[in-house]
Image (cartoon, coloured by chain):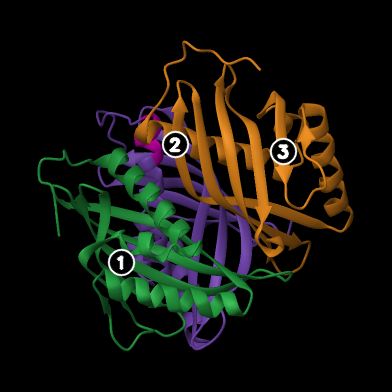
Chain colours: A purple, B orange, C green
Amino acid sequence: MTVIAHIPAATGAELYHQVQEFYAHQMQLLDDGRVDEWALTFTPDGVFAANAHPEPSTGREAISAAARKAHAAMDEQGIRRRHWLGMVSVRESGPGSATARCYALVIEIPRGGQAVVRLSTVCEDRLVLSEAGWQVQYRQVNRDDLV
Amino acid sequence: MTVIAHIPAATGAELYHQVQEFYAHQMQLLDDGRVDEWALTFTPDGVFAANAHPEPSTGREAISAAARKAHAAMDEQGIRRRHWLGMVSVRESGPGSATARCYALVIEIPRGGQAVVRLSTVCEDRLVLSEAGWQVQYRQVNRDDLV
Amino acid sequence: MTVIAHIPAATGAELYHQVQEFYAHQMQLLDDGRVDEWALTFTPDGVFAANAHPEPSTGREAISAAARKAHAAMDEQGIRRRHWLGMVSVRESGPGSATARCYALVIEIPRGGQAVVRLSTVCEDRLVLSEAGWQVQYRQVNRDDLV
């Protein structure tokens, strides 16, 4: 993980804005099936854990592979997914690092069909600032229907 | 109500960010059933009024009691609620005070079941800055299905 | 189109906040049926294009006429619409101009009935800063069920 200590850490509104912008960008990559770019929004040793998965995905290769598989499965059924993150709460946890908690909805839209809210989750992130901008070091996603 | 006049009033992006962060925190408390902490996000004389309620709840005791009752009723049915506030518009109304208008959705997730959008509402707040941060002095929530 | 070059262009958190606030205000106008004010949130030569429409609406008269017709049709059926814009990504594209990309949901609430997510779309805007604040110069809305 390359964390650049001399990047001045944003605080307050600037940090909050950067995290909102990061989430928007990151989810657009995922929803557009750009899974390699999606994996680059995690640190090289990044972890994606979820209460719906038996084991966490660790590292970019595992993270992009899981997203590629999920995207292909949806694609085959003619379903598009939109991930909405909202009610975002951000805490600076050190220079160039932050924790964030938000709600996340998965909206599914079948081609020619009716959009539905498929899943409601809570997402907790450990974020670090790298040369490439903010990255997720550890993400825990908990589906509300499973807890 | 303790409003501390010497806290420098935020404006622009900083005020907007503080209100977004406040809403995220406040709704996470409500959705997690932490109803006493939820009541502390209102001023001591805070009012929660809604077009779905015959009378407003006035004061923290009434506000926490109403939330406790609603949360227990959901809990019994194995339903979790997530409150999403969005499309937030904020106006400074004086030093350390603001009005805000937003849309609010209530998402319901039955244990082991399918998430649904239960309610769509409009939420209007009078907010004041206290030693403990932003607090709601007066909240009016109008359900869209009733108007 | 009156673009005032000497208004200092906001960047970072301030720009992001202004766009969020603009979207909240703009959608509240549309959802409240204030279609003439809605049209004023576009530049005089503003364009509203959508993959669901055979042709774009060009100019404020066309834009308000289309909104008036849509609002009246909903009103007759006793349906209220709420437009939610989220996952907003903003890029400054010059002094007093920006591009933005966001997700947009249309929530429909029948009087006395159950709210539903009617549509999921992606919205791309070219925004310019005028004396009256931010305005849309070109909006492209693509419904996810049609692409």
Looking at the rendering, which quadrant does residue B25 occupy? top right
Residue type beneath disc 1: Glu
Q: Residue at x 38, y 55 (%)?
A: C88
As for residue B137 lying within the magenta part, the answer is no
Dot 1 and dot 2 residues touching (CB under 8 Å):
no
Looking at the rendering, which quadrant does residue C111 occupy? bottom right
At mark 3, the secondary structure is: strand
Residue linked to disc 1: C124
Going from the N terminus, do you reach mark 2 or mark 3 first? 3
| Number of residues whose C-alpha sits closer than 10 Å to that of mark 2, classed few (under 14), some (14–19) or many (20 or more) | some
Q: Position of residue C110 (x, y in %)?
A: 66, 72
Q: Position of residue B72 (x, y in %)?
A: 87, 47
Dot 2 and dot 3 residues touching (CB under 8 Å):
no
Residue A145, above or below C12 = below
| Number of residues whose C-alpha sits closer than 10 Å to that of mark 3, classed few (under 14), some (14–19) or many (20 or more) | many
C-alpha span from label 1 to label 2: 26 Å
Marked residue chain, label 1: C
Q: Nearer the viewer, residue C41 or A85?
A: C41
Total marks in image:
3
Magenta region: A11-16
Q: Residue at x 54, y 48 (%)?
A: B102
Q: Nearer the viewer, residue C109 or A136?
A: C109
Residue type beneath disc 3: Phe
As for residue A14 lying within the magenta part, the answer is yes
Residue linked to disc 3: B48
Residue type beneath disc 2: Arg
**Residue B34 located left or right of residue B130:** right
